[in-house]
Image (cartoon, rainbow, N blue to C red):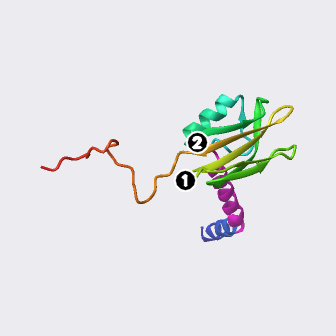
Amino acid sequence: MRTSQQHLFRQTRRLLPLIILSVAALSLGVCSRGPDRIGTNYASLADLEKAQQQAGYAKIGTFGNDWPARIIEVTRSRDRLTFARQDGTRHSYNGFAGHTLKMIRLQGRRAEVIIVFRSDPVQPASQPPHPAGRGESPVRVL
């Protein structure tokens, strides 16, 4: 019995790097899932918008209209965003203090599609959101 345990230990030790790499690859696959993962296909702008709204983003710009389309690039930036279309035209979104901006570039059958989103505004640390919503206290002290 002792030799079979030693054999199993040697086998496991030899396979350990492969096991670690497999677990890491699976973890990255799980973490990279989401509404703006590279390679994700969308049948329409409405489908992409719905997924982004559920993630806390609102559409602020659209370039192109070739659906279905697959995500090929995602760029995020804080407060402002600059990017170039395939034809070289540069675009800038400024004046979005407190927001994360996101440019999603998709490839349709014939042309690129670019959709720009902004996050919901971030509350300043000095003014946390009030739990009751309209200035009322959630608990009455007698």
Element on which disc 1 rests = loop
**Up-down: is 21 above or below 90?**
below
- Residue, disc 2: 57
Indicate the position of residue 57 as horizontal and vertical percent values: 58, 42
Instruction: Give the image location of residue 51, x and y in percent.
Output: 61, 36
Q: Is residue 24 magenta?
A: yes
Return the x and y of residue 125 as percentages of the image width and height: 44, 59
Residue drawn at the location 64% of the way across and 49% of the way down: 101
Residue at left 69%, top 31%? 45
Location of residue 53 in the rendering, given as x and y in whole percent from the top left corner: 57, 37
Residue with the mark numbered 1: 98
Q: Residue at x 66, y 47 (%)?
A: 102
Q: Residue furthest front?
A: 95
Give the magenta part as a residue range: 14-34
Q: Residue at x 64, y 69 (%)?
A: 9
> Which image quarter is the N terminus in?
bottom right
Q: Nearer the viewer, mark 2 or mark 1?
A: 1
Camera-nearest residue between 118 and 29: 118
